[in-house]
Amino acid sequence: MDLDDARRLAVDEMTRHGLRGWTFAYDRAKRRAGATHFADRRITLSRELTGLHDEAEVRQTVLHEIAHALVGPRHGHDATWRATALRIGSNGQRCLARDTPTVSGAWVGVCPAGHQTDAHRRPVRVKACRQCTGEFAERVFSWTHHGRAAPMHPQYEEELAALRAGTLRVRFAEGSRVRITAHGRWHGAQGVVVKRGRTRYHVQTGRHLLTVPFAGVTLL
């Protein structure tokens, strides 16, 4: 849809449904079509996705966000929100239809079996294909950026190296004292493992509770 036409549609619908004091704007989102910013009393649409969607799809997105604005931030996608959405002409769906056009990410991951995924930002974590079966290490995606090999995030490289070396599977017990080796603000900090998730430790360092990838800590 033309962006100027979409802006007029959004403003008209906002006025029609009584959103006084609210404004409209475009944002740079690529995964979601719209958003409601309660603190700023503003509704936004994705500039890129709006340009790909037809008028009916844009109207549904606008009505979806107007319903959020009308019921307030505490309702999410609950029954109150849905009832309001249906009342003002929305289909009451939480997400866009699966066949709605999307913006592909510049980062493309391909698993050993040829399945693909994409991302708009450089991956930080090692990711495995969910369509394939077998061990995690046998399903890992290899990434390119705009069709070319590109440097990965240092944390990704560390985790991948640990996975290939077989050390990523090592799990420190709760109560273990560890040092954080992952790059970032907390590099070198020491703490205690208080919980183990599927891929990350919860490490208590003084007053701070951090979540750190398994490959990002070492035992003291």
Image: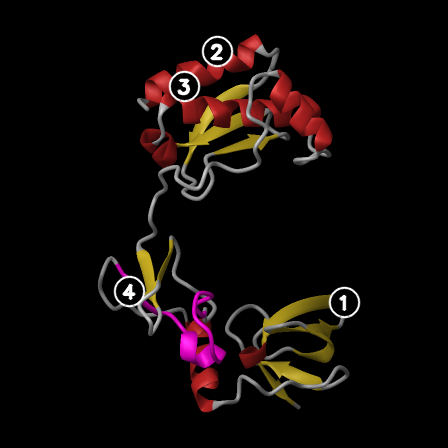
- Measured Cα–Cα span from mark 3 to mark 4: 35 Å
Viewer-side residue, 152 vs 109: 109
- Measured Cα–Cα span from mark 1 to mark 2: 50 Å
Provide the residue span drawn in magenta: 128-145
- Measured Cα–Cα span from mark 2 to mark 3: 9 Å
Question: Would you say the residues marked 1 and 2 are in contact, meaning their CB atoms lie under 8 Å apart?
Answer: no
Kind of residue at badge 2: Asp
- x and y, in percent, of residue 174 in the image: 75, 82
- Decide which of tag 3 and tag 4 comes sooner along the chain: 3
What label sits on residue 7 in the rendered view?
3
Residue 177 relative to residue 182: left or right: right
Judging by the rendered image, the residue that carries numbered circle 2 is 12
- Decide which of tag 1 and tag 2 comes sooner along the chain: 2
Q: To which quarter of the image does residue 79 belong?
A: top right
Residue at 66% x, 68% y is 210
Q: Is residue 84 above or below residue 93?
A: above
Viewer-side residue, 187 vs 175: 175
Classify 10 Å Cα crowding around label 3: few (below 14), some (14-19), many (20 and above).
Answer: some
* Front position among marks 3 and 1: 3
Question: Would you say the residues marked 1 and 4 are in contact, meaning their CB atoms lie under 8 Å apart?
Answer: no
